[in-house]
């Protein structure tokens, strides 16, 4: 034996854009395996897969049977999945609950909450059988605070909760489950909201201790760490990556963060 480590198979749902695409690029840069991009937009998924030298599959994580079939196909065609990143999700415009159509509420919960759970269980089956695997769920700081996002915030809170539950359930099999909660991250989706006037970038930045937004690449580096052997003793945790937004917002009660000094 030459001591070389076996190549890993990384699967990233919602990997065609934003945080998911950044995670795919980060895993590719590590250079120890194959990155599989899973997204309902196959053309965009294939573009990212071509960029990172990986594979692409079309999938709507809201379709339970399709997720089960896709997980089995990836295991068959690509090899045993070592890492799953659940980044597939949809966002919500901040409106009062009586102005939020229930079909939109249902869509957000179906993808962001149910879709994450279904993907976890579908891919974990083979991980449990092999007694190894790492799952990283993309949650949100919205799931940790009160916000006028009456579908998205509860769905992301559920992702944080299910991460802890599944970590405890599968720990005996050596399967780790962790979450990353991004703060306001400059993804194409957020940039579109800024361009439409639905978000004010100066307000978002002013309420973070570091006075700026997070980049997708910064999220990806934390995801890659949690997925790696360097985090082998970490499971059931939720790691906020938010430029200090959670730390800073209570200061608004006292007049806001201090201005630059010196």
Image: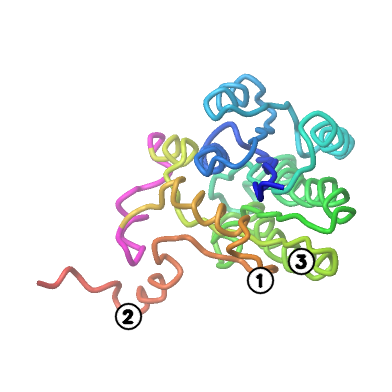
Q: Nearer the viewer, residue 209 or 36?
A: 36
Compare marks 3 and 1 and give the one earlier in the sequence.
3
Residue ID for mark 2: 254
Horizontal side of 215 relative to 22 (left or right) equals left
In the structure shown, which secondary structural element does the residue marked by tag 1 occupy?
loop
Quarter of the image that includes the C terminus: bottom left
Q: Nearer the viewer, residue 225 or 260?
A: 225
Horizontal side of 50 relative to 58 (left or right) equals left
Q: Residue furthest bottom?
A: 254
Residue 253: percent from left, percent from top: 37, 78
Tell me how far mark 3 sits from mark 1, CA to CA. 12 Å
In the structure shown, which secondary structural element does the residue marked by tag 3 occupy?
helix
Which residue is rendered at x = 54% and y = 45% of the image? Answer: 93
Residue 70: percent from left, percent from top: 82, 33
Residue ID for mark 3: 167
The label nearer to you, 3 versus 1, is: 1
Tell me how far mark 2 sits from mark 1, CA to CA. 38 Å
Residue 68: percent from left, percent from top: 87, 38
Magenta highlight on residue 208: yes
- The answer to whether residue 219 is above or below residue 101 is below
Label 3 neighbour load within 10 Å: few <14, some 14-19, many 20+? many
Residue ID for mark 1: 233
Number of numbered callouts drawn: 3
Q: Nearer the viewer, residue 60 or 6?
A: 6
Horizontal side of 135 relative to 65 (left or right) equals left
Magenta highlight on residue 82: no
Q: Residue furthest top?
A: 43
Label 1 neighbour load within 10 Å: few <14, some 14-19, many 20+? few
Residue range of the region highlighted in magenta in the rendering? 195-211
Tell me how far mark 2 sits from mark 3, CA to CA. 38 Å
Q: Residue furthest left?
A: 262
Which residue is rendered at x = 38% and y = 35% of the image? Answer: 195
């Amino acid at each position: 034996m030459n001591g070389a480590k076996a190549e890993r198979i990384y699967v990233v749902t919602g990997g065609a854009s934003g945080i998911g695409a950044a995670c795919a690029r980060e895993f590719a840069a590590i250079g120890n395996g194959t990155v599989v991009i899973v997204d309902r937009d196959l053309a965009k998924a294939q573009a990212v897969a071509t960029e990172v030298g990986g594979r692409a599959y079309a999938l709507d994580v809201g379709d339970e049977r399709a997720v089960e079939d896709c997980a089995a196909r990836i295991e068959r065609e690509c090899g045993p999945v070592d890492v799953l990143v659940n980044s597939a999700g949809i966002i919500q415009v901040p409106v009062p609950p009586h102005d939020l159509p229930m079909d939109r509420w249902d869509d957000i919960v179906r993808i962001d909450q149910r879709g994450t759970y279904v993907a976890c269980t579908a891919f974990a089956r083979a991980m449990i059988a092999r007694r190894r695997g790492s799952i990283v769920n993309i949650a949100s700081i919205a799931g940790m605070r009160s916000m006028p996002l009456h579908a998205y915030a509860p769905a992301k809170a559920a992702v944080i909760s299910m991460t802890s539950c599944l970590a405890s359930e599968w720990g005996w099999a050596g399967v780790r489950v962790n979450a990353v909660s991004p703060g306001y991250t400059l993804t194409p989706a957020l940039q579109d909201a800024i361009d439409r006037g639905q978000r004010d970038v100066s307000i978002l930045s002013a309420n973070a201790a570091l006075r700026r937004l997070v980049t997708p690449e910064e999220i990806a580096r934390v995801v890659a760490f949690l997925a790696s052997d360097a985090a082998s003793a970490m499971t059931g945790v939720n790691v906020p990556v938010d430029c200090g937004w959670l730390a800073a917002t209570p200061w608004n009660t006292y007049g806001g963060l201090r201005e630059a000094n010196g």
